[in-house]
Amino acid sequence: MKILMEAINYDKFKWQICGDLKAIVLMLEQQQEFTKYCCFICEWDSRTRSLHYSRKDWPARKSLEPGIMNVENQPLVKNFVKAMNQEEGAFAYLRVTFPRLSKATLKEGVFIGSQIRDLIKDEYFDKILQGDEKAAWDNFKFVVKGFLGNRRAQYYEEFVNNLLQSYQKFGCITSLKIHFLHSHLDIFPEN
């Protein structure tokens, strides 16, 4: 990564890098799995789960030293699938819809982009979800279309807040991506 940054003269131009959180984690030489203080902007503690949705302001990082206080956590769909009741129809439908995924992979909610897009378009999956599960899924779809897509909706902050509330109510564990939406939404550039 250092060689790449030198090749594009990053130190000279100080470009703002917009990318997937995995790319940012790589550039900051952060670990790929669970430890404490995974946010590269603040010192959000991934282990204090009781404060994840209730506390928004965390102390800012004092430095960005590689290897110090870092981690990456789970993406949005993975959190949703892990919170699902595995004994009910919606989870069984996922097994039928994606027969090539192993039970362990499905249980962990590991999906690629095309599978997520297929699931978003699947009307039957929408119909078998109920209650908090349905609300969380609907809000996830609004965020995908109105915030994570190519065009940002006028009320994208409302979409994100609704997603956060429904994920909390549904019992999804707060991941780095959810924390980033919750605490650092103002950092996303307009484009």
Image (cartoon, helix red, strand yellow):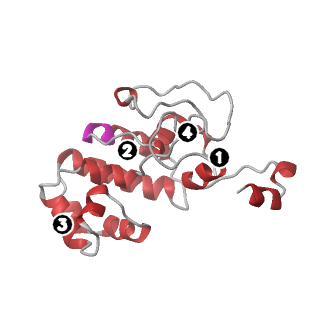
Quarter of the image where one finds residue 172: top left
What residue span does the magenta drawing correspond to?
166-170
The disc at residue 93 is: 3
**As shown in the figure, which amino acid type bears the numbered disc 3?**
Tyr
Name the residue: 55% across, 59% down.
Answer: 151
Left or right, residue 18 beside residue 162: right
User: Which residue in the structure is indicated by mark 4?
Assistant: 70
- The residue carrying pointer 2 sits among few (fewer than 14), some (14 to 19) or many (20 or more) residues within 10 Å by Cα, namely many
Left or right, residue 88 beside residue 94: left
- The residue carrying pointer 4 sits among few (fewer than 14), some (14 to 19) or many (20 or more) residues within 10 Å by Cα, namely many
Q: SS of the residue at dot 1?
A: loop
Q: SS of the residue at dot 2?
A: helix
Name the residue: 66% across, 41% down.
Answer: 66
Disc 4 + disc 1, Cβ < 8 Å: yes
Disc 2 + disc 4, Cβ < 8 Å: no
Disc 1 + disc 2, Cβ < 8 Å: no
Looking at the image, residue 165 lies above or below residue 135 = above
Q: Earlier in the sequence, mark 2 or mark 4?
A: 4
- The residue carrying pointer 1 sits among few (fewer than 14), some (14 to 19) or many (20 or more) residues within 10 Å by Cα, namely some
